[in-house]
Image (spheres, rainbow, N blue to C red):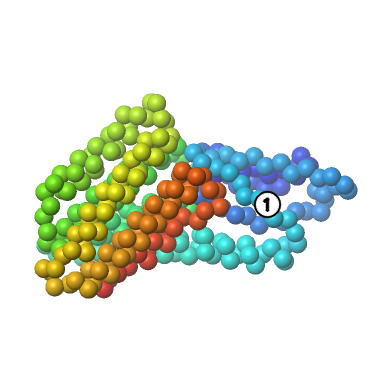
Amino acid sequence: QSHVIRLNGEHLHVATTDAGALSFPAGYLINVPAALLRTGENTLHVDVGCKAQGGMTLPLIGPTVDLRGEFVQRQILARWVPVGLNLACVTFSLFLVALWWQRRQERAIGLFGALYMITALRNLSYFVEVDLGTAPQFDSWMHLSAHTASVWLIGRFAMAFTGQQRRGYERILDLTGIGFPLVALAFCAWDPMLDTVRRVLQPALIALSLPALAILLRDRTSGQAVPQRYLAVGLACVLVAGLHDYLAIRQMGHIGALPWIAWAIPLGLAPFTLV
């Protein structure tokens, strides 16, 4: 999301002039030069540009010293900590993939490393505040494809970790992994930003993760029942976070809603280190 703010016709603040730049809505603490203020009525003009969803919360106006504390606190919780946690996830996922590369028989480790990497990188993309030069339509398709891939990996990981084979579930995962991105491409001409497509397909992807949760909870043969329950609880938290973000951000367009998934992926999947 980008914006241009003018006070009494003069530029006050610009956050990337390209409305197609990729970023999750962010807060800004802006100092107002006294020279821009007039006696009596002052006019504040805000232009907001976004790829798909945008908006603006009610601006808070007051002395900088009074606003700074709340602003910094929100930045820490909404951006700095989630970015740090997801960067740590990417680093850990590289370690897991490298470990799998040396021990190919540890398929569950490789699947989980790929899952951690894709989901963490997807989260990090929401905090990018520069124009990456990619088309908005491509970005939307990539996010849907990443979500689809993560669901495929969750299902495959659950079966590899428990040693179970669910042929029907495997076929559904494979068809979804190939079919959903192709369906999205097919509808690009009618739905360039894939708003309708993602509203329809994302609930299906969340639902398709539920069998993986059931597999982890019901397994009694691997000798790791208790650790698996921790992992299942973490996965359940990720699914709840995904459902919240879908409803609050995509469906309701709540501009002030914090993305739970940026916290749920690093913390919810952390129990894997226990098993």
| Residue 41 in the figure: left or right of residue 168 | right
Residue drawn at the location 26% of the way across and 54% of the way down: 210
Picture coordinates of residue 226 (x, y %)?
Answer: 22, 73
Q: Helix, strand, or loop for circle 1?
A: loop
| Residue 183 in the figure: left or right of residue 59 | left
Q: Amino acid at mark 1?
A: Pro
Image: 265 above or below 227: above
Density class for disc 1 (Cα within 10 Å; few <14, some 14-19, many ≥20) is few
Residue drawn at the location 46% of the way across and 43% of the way down: 251
Residue 240 appears in view? yes
Picture coordinates of residue 236 (x, y %)?
Answer: 32, 60
| Residue 39 in the figure: left or right of residue 161 | right
Residue 137 appears in view? no
The residue at the far top in this view is 189
Quarter of the image containing the N terminus?
top right
Picture coordinates of residue 108 (x, y %)?
Answer: 18, 61
Q: In the figure, residue 190 lies in which quadrant?
A: top left
Residue drawn at the location 68% of the way across and 52% of the way down: 59
Residue drawn at the location 22% of the way across and 56% of the way down: 212
Residue topped by disc 1: 59
